[in-house]
Image (cartoon, rainbow, N blue to C red):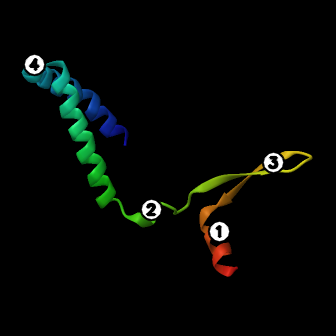
Amino acid sequence: MQAFVGFGLIFGTPLASFVYGIGGYTWTFYVFAIMLTVNTIACLFLIPSELNNKGKTVAQIQITTDNASISQINIDDAFKAEERE
């Protein structure tokens, strides 16, 4: 992940300068907006959907009249509890 941030910092500036030289200020935004849109669509299709809920935790806030408490629950456990009910 950090390597791609480094690649973006290294190659992003020259690429943006090249696009700015050809198309000007507004075309720089158009080109990178198109690149981000294509990247988003590719991620929607290439990332498996089973990665969405695996191993994540959600903060569940329980508010009572006396106090408020925050507890961590595992999403997988929450789905199993719903299936049992």
Name which of mark 4 and mark 1 comes first in the sequence.
Answer: 4
Of all residues shown, which one is farthest toward the bottom? 84
Q: Which residue is mark 2?
A: 51
In the rendered structure, find residue 20 and report the number of the disc placed on it. Answer: none
**At label 1, which amino acid type do we have?**
Asp
Residue 83 vs 60, above or below: the answer is below
Q: Quadrant of residue 44?
A: bottom left
Secondary structure at numbered mark 3: strand
Q: Residue at x 68, y 73 (%)?
A: 81
Residue 35 vs 25, above or below: the answer is below
Name which of mark 2 and mark 4 comes first in the sequence.
Answer: 4
Give the distance between the C-alpha atoms of the residues marked 4 and 3, in whole angstroms.
56 Å
Q: Which residue is mark 1?
A: 77
The local crowd at label 2, few if under 14, some if 14 to 19, many if 20 or more residues have their Cα within 10 Å, is few
Q: Which residue is mark 4?
A: 21
**At label 4, which amino acid type do we have?**
Gly
The local crowd at label 4, few if under 14, some if 14 to 19, many if 20 or more residues have their Cα within 10 Å, is few
Which quadrant, please, contains the C terminus? bottom right
Q: Quadrant of residue 50?
A: bottom left
Give the distance between the C-alpha atoms of the residues marked 4 and 1, in whole angstroms.
54 Å
Give the distance between the C-alpha atoms of the residues marked 2 and 3, in whole angstroms.
29 Å
Name which of mark 1 and mark 3 comes first in the sequence.
Answer: 3
Do tag 2 and tag 3 residues touch (Cβ < 8 Å)? no
**Left of 57 or right of it: where is 30?**
left
Do tag 2 and tag 4 residues touch (Cβ < 8 Å)? no
Name which of mark 2 and mark 3 comes first in the sequence.
Answer: 2
Secondary structure at numbered mark 2: helix
